[in-house]
Amino acid sequence: MEEIEKYYGLDFKDKKLLKTALTHSSYANENNCESNERLEFIGDAVLDLIMGKYLFLENKNYNEGNLTKKRAKYVCESALVEYAKACNLKKYLFLGKGEEKSGGRDRVALQADAFEALIGAVYIDKGLIETYKIFEKTVITVMNNNSEDDFVDYKSYLQELVQSDKRSLEYKIISETGPSHNKEFTTRVYMDEILMGEGIGKSKKEAEQNAAEMALKKLAMRSIKF
């Protein structure tokens, strides 16, 4: 954990908070401690805020719609995974024995969640200014070195497509299987109550993205025009 602090030039007041940010639910269940899920919740909101401000200042000619699309792309799961990889975050994660054996350290959803939790932990411990250190060193660097096409946000693409005809989208979780440390979610996406796609993932976000991807492929195959 000290390597993470040194990498970002941070000095946590509460070291336990940093460990919690790196603690997957599988480890928490085995060791009777707190997982990073609550910090992930905070980190998601903080990253949205910082990204929104950054894009607002960097893209003065963009309207609200353009900014919203761009933010969605840069905070989607595939983008979060790239941020996690950039700081080799998976190396520091605390995983349960079963999760470790099953290759959990390489799961994209797990890495994405951990990065959000790290953002949340820094914000709670150090405040917004210090949190920007992570954003500047990792997020902005990855954004500048990658093409926008590297961050695929199928949900946003699908939303944009159906909004042009004032249609509505709804995502529903139809099943949730497996132990708490290794859950698998199945989600369906409906357009005006018509089933358009189904996706499976290790997180709700991943399942929704996969469902949206299937819906987009279905629309392309059928050449449906709105």
Image (cartoon, rainbow, N blue to C red):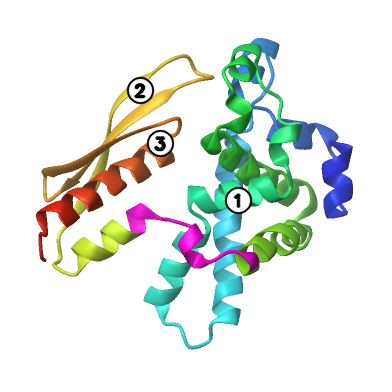
Q: Quadrant of residue 17?
A: top right
In this orientation, which residue lies closer to the viewer: 149 or 114? 149
**Which residue is pictured at 64% across the width and 52% down the height?**
83
Identify which amino acid the numbered label 2 is placed on. Answer: Glu
Q: Quadrant of residue 110?
A: top right
In this orientation, which residue lies closer to the viewer: 11 or 81? 81
The magenta region covers 145-156
Identify which amino acid the numbered label 1 is placed on. Answer: Glu
**Which residue is pictured at 59% across the width and 56% down the height?**
47
Describe residue 5's horizontal placement relative to residue 18 as left or right.
Answer: right
**Which residue is pictured at 11% across the width and 59% down the height?**
223
Residue that badge 2 annotates: 176
In this view, 53 is above or below 1: below
Residue that badge 1 annotates: 82
Q: Which comes before the other along the chain, label 2 or label 3?
A: 2
Residue 12 shows in this picture: no
Describe residue 181's horizontal placement relative to residue 204 as left or right.
Answer: right
- In the rendering, at what x and y percent does residue 97 appear? 65, 12
Q: Which comes before the other along the chain, label 1 or label 3?
A: 1
